[in-house]
Image: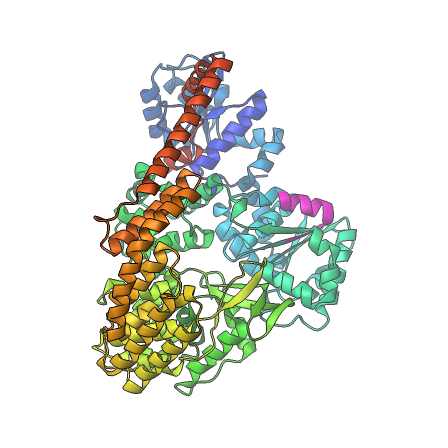
């Protein structure tokens, strides 16, 4: 079987030669990248001496004349440095005379003619050691026999998409731990269901398995629509392998199974399980499989679909396998040496391998698009890292050039929602957006098809969660479909896109169905020109934390009125945001955006435009609802109202109403003053909110200061008698000192009792530690020497190799 070595990278070729040497000699060989220990790629090291050295020259399809100069240079470089047996392996074609000339070139080392391996010798050794070929899967993936089978007219016409994909991608395949698991599934059950998240490599794994079966003499067939495709080509007594890629992709979330296909599929699976000459490989997204099994009883009861399932996720990829994925895309992307060196410098490839957004699909997009990106070759690494951090250029090319208008509309709507949204809510939001300009409304079936196409690159879909919300309660058996963006950086791209498409902002604002959507547009409008603290407060209020290290893009100016209109219109709209339940596994709870938080966004936007957007009636309504919450809220929650009160204090039209609200809040907080923090919170109501003082507030603040002066000393002595460890004492002392500073009493009142208590506790800890050391020394005086000796042995031991570094050094 002639093999196609051109699809092997230099690293692949080196591993192949190493495995053949190990098979020949029955011992483990060491490998080294080119350039390290000059002229040594592989060696056998025994009893402190080198007994065999091998050098690999990967030159597929070349003749001796084409590599002669390279070999002469190599022979001159190594001279007579090695006295042990020397082997030279090349993927070029060599004649007997060629080998004699090579042996003469390398006269300085022990290179015999029989130890010069050309491509014919490699083929012969692979026949002698078939296990090596099995382990080096690219050899049988790229073999001419397999490709001839793939290109057979009958199969090609039937499965041209599959064939084209395998031929184009065969060089990029990387085995993960899921590969042997999947082979075992096929051997035991004859059926393997590969499920996982989009972009993780399900189809790649399935195709690799199919080609492996092809190389073992199985017929290969691909089902494209339903099980009928398999039934039509079924041949009794013939070894047949069937691939049903995305076998639930047309149903469940996205469509219904064809009539009775759930039963037919279950029957087919059981039929193949009982047949010795048929295997079935299927791929699907895990959430779709779960939903389908819940909906279709026959699929749920199929033991094969459960026993033969392999869930593929990033945990199947080790760091070395991620490195191979990145390496293969670089090696076969026809990048210049300058571009490759940008990745090699200072081992920067590790930043890509360890990146939280690492995904084979993103890596493929990056390497494919680099040549047309206009970026200089020396900045290839930066281009890759930026794409993982913020793949805007990739988004732009796809979003503006490759998507339909319906797909772009769906993504625009989903981006304004930002977090997970339930399918029906997303459908309603999309229809609201479409209705603004009188466009055709997308029906639910079409929406499901759109989601299928966008999934992976743009969105993630999950149906394995139950919903628990205030409206419908908890329904553990009712699994809902939740959709979210696959990469948060796409949000930044959309905001930039809108800044250059101001005509679309009005439609988006008028088409908002949920407050979260208008809130997102408002935060974009605040942009980098707004005060940092305003943006931070807004993010803290609604997303839990402000963005670190990036500036928010800003929409085109002139849309503040329509945005404020959307915010006020949706002031009482239901929330569409879902988050994981802190109590139950795989349960989502609706996250309510409080009225207080909604009002805060409105005030932040209004403040940016000189307090000119909100009418007096709206302001009075905000203060009225604030006052009602102050009357009813738990004391511990009153401080949440402070940011809102600070912004309201800047409006003269509601000054009197706000003073009354502030006095009410202060009066409630003054009722419970049991801890230094209680005094600090009460003081901040008078001092930090910017609300005009009243006669009552001035007198109450004076009384509060007097009460704290006497409270501080009493609490100091009481707390010193209560605390029993250093950490607790330090915490109490810190609370008291901060409160003393806020009340400007830190120079006149000294927490003597807590300071003395802390000193005593620290002394006791020190004594305990000293006693423990003495006890150790008396019981085992040699312990310290042994520990020091062990530590020295650890540091002096031979460090493990760097397989990732060795892999990437073969790029140049």
- Residue at image position (62%, 42%) is 180
Name the spot of residue 411 as percent of width and height, x first: 42, 70
Name the spot of residue 525 as percent of width and height, x first: 28, 72
Magenta-tinted stretch? 181-193
Taking depth in this image into account, of 62 and 479 the one nearest to the observer is 479
Q: Image check: 545 left or right of 163?
A: left
Which quarter of the picture shows residue 82?
A: top left
Q: Image check: 658 left or right of 466?
A: left
Report the predominant secondary structure element of the magenta stretch: helix
Against 361, is 608 above or below? below
Residue 559 visible, this angle:
no
Which quarter of the picture shows residue 476?
A: bottom right
Q: Image check: 233 left or right of 696?
A: right
| 373 part of magenta stretch | no
Name the spot of residue 771 as percent of width and height, x first: 44, 22
Taking depth in this image into account, of 104 and 3 the one nearest to the observer is 3
| 191 part of magenta stretch | yes
């Amino acid at each position: 079987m002639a093999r196609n070595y051109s699809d092997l990278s230099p690293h692949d070729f080196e591993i192949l030669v190493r495995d053949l040497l190990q098979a020949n000699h029955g011992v483990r060989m060491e490998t080294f990248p080119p350039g390290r220990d000059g002229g040594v790629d592989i060696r056998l090291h025994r009893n402190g001496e080198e007994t065999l050295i091998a050098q690999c020259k990967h030159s597929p399809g070349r003749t001796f004349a084409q590599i002669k100069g390279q070999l002469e240079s190599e022979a001159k470089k190594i001279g007579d440095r090695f006295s042990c047996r020397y082997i030279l392996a090349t993927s070029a074609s060599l004649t007997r005379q060629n080998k004699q000339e090579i042996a003469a070139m390398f006269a300085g080392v022990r290179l015999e003619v029989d130890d010069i391996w050309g491509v014919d010798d490699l083929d012969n050794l692979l026949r002698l050691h078939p296990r090596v070929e099995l382990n080096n899967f690219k050899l049988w993936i790229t073999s001419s026999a397999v490709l001839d089978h793939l290109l057979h007219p009958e199969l090609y016409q039937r499965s041209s998409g599959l064939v084209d994909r395998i031929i184009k991608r065969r060089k990029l395949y990387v085995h993960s731990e899921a590969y042997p698991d999947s082979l075992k599934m096929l051997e035991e059950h004859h059926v393997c269901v590969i499920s996982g998240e989009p972009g993780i490599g399900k189809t790649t794994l399935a195709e690799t398995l199919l080609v492996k079966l092809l190389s073992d003499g199985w017929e290969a067939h691909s089902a494209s629509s339903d099980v009928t495709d398999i039934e039509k080509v079924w041949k009794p007594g013939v070894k047949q392998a069937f691939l049903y890629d995305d076998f639930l992709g047309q149903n469940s979330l996205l469509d219904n199974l064809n009539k009775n296909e759930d039963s037919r599929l279950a029957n087919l699976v059981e039929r193949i399980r009982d047949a010795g000459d048929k295997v079935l490989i299927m791929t699907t997204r895990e959430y779709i499989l779960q939903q389908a099994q819940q909906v279709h009883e026959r699929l749920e009861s199929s033991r094969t679909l459960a026993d033969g399932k392999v869930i593929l996720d990033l945990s199947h990829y080790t760091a070395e396998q991620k490195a191979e994925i990145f390496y293969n895309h670089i090696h076969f992307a026809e990048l210049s040496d300058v571009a490759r060196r940008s990745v090699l410098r200072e081992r920067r490839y590790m930043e890509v391998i360890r990146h939280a957004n690492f995904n084979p699909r993103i890596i493929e997009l990056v390497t494919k698009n680099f040549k047309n990106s206009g970026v200089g070759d020396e900045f290839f690494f930066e281009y890759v890292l930026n794409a993982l951090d913020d793949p805007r250029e990739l988004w732009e090319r796809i979003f503006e050039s490759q998507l339909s208008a319906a797909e772009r509309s769906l993504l625009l709507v989903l981006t304004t929602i930002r977090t997970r949204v339930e399918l029906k809510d997303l459908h309603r939001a999309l229809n609201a957006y479409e209705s603004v300009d009188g466009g055709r409304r997308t029906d639910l079936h079409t929406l499901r098809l759109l989601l299928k196409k966008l999934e992976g690159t743009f969105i993630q879909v999950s149906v394995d969660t139950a919903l628990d919300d205030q409206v419908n309660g908890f329904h553990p058996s009712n699994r809902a479909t939740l959709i979210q963006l696959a990469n948060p950086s796409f949000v930044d791209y959309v905001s930039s896109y809108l800044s250059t498409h101001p005509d679309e902002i009005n439609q988006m604002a008028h088409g908002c169905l949920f407050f979260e959507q208008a809130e997102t547009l408002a935060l974009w409008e605040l942009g980098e020109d707004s005060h940092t603290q305003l943006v931070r407060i807004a993010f803290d209020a609604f997303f839990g934390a402000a963005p670190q290290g990036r500036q928010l893009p800003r929409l085109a100016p002139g849309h503040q009125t329509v945005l404020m209109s959307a915010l006020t219109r949706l002031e009482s709209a239901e929330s569409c945001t879902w988050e994981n339940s802190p109590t139950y596994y795989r349960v989502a709870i609706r996250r309510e955006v409080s009225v207080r938080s909604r009002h805060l966004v409105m005030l932040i936007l209004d403040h940016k435009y000189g307090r000119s957007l909100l009418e007096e009636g709206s302001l009075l309504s905000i203060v009225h609802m604030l006052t009602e919450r102050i009357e009813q809220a738990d004391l511990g929650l009153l401080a949440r109202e402070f940011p809102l009160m600070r912004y309201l204090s800047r409006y003269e039209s509601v000054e009197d109403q706000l003073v009354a609200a502030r006095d009410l809040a202060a009066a409630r907080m003054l009722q419970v003053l049991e801890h230094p923090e209680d005094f600090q919170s009460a003081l901040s109501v008078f001092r930090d909110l910017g609300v005009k003082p009243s006669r009552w507030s001035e007198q109450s603040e004076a009384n509060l200061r007097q009460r704290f002066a006497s409270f501080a000393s009493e609490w100091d002595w009481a707390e010193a008698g209560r605390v029993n460890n250093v950490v607790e004492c330090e915490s109490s002392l810190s609370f008291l000192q901060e409160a003393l500073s806020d009340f400007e009493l830190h120079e006149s009142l000294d927490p003597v009792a807590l300071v003395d208590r802390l000193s005593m506790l620290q002394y006791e800890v020190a004594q305990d530690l000293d006693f423990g050391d003495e006890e150790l020394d008396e019981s085992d005086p040699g312990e310290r020497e042994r520990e020091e000796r062990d530590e020295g042995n650890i540091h002096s031991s031979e460090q493990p190799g760097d397989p990732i570094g060795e892999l990437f050094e073969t790029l140049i």
